Image (cartoon, rainbow, N blue to C red):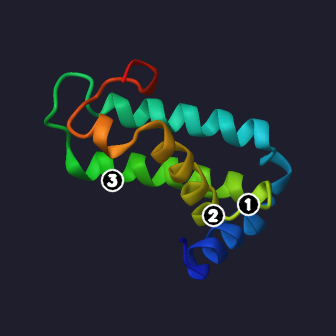
Amino acid sequence: MVDDRVRDALRAFVAERDWAQFHTPENLAKSISIEAGELLECFQWGADADPQAVQEELADVLSYCLHLVDALGLDPGDIVLDKLEKTRAKYPVEKARGSSTKYDQL
């Protein structure tokens, strides 16, 4: 799902700074949450967020997610597709189409 050049660029960035020592799964998960909060902050006072700010914060969230899957030895495409299959079973089209109702209430 993510091409090799993105993965390699992220790895090189971390290696050049000797930051792998700080990239434990716990620290990376915390960083994802922190950056997601900063993304949400773009929309704090309304739906009209600065597109450049949103893009930069979204890049931070994605970067930390990719660092975490790399640290855990996972493939991002595989885990997304696996979860999609589980979610597809919880939300069958005939019950969920056009509805935001949680699966256990369908």
Residue identified by numbered label 2:
78
Check the picture and name the quadrant holding the C terminus: top left
If you read the primary sequence from the N terminus, does the residue marked by circle 3 or circle 1 appear first? Answer: 3
Mark 1 — residue? 74
Residue placed at 81% from the left, 60% from the top?
18
1 and 2 marks in contact (CB < 8 Å): yes
Q: Quadrant of residue 13?
A: bottom right
Q: Where does the image place residue 4, in percent across and percent down from the top left? A: 61, 80
94 up-or-down from 30: above or below: below
Cβ atoms at labels 3 and 1 below 8 Å apart: no
Say which of 79 and 94 sits in front.
Answer: 94
For the point 55% across and 59% down, the residue is 81
Q: Which residue is outermost to the top?
A: 105
Front: mark 2 or 3: 2
Front disc: 1 or 2: 2
Which amino acid, mark 3? Gln
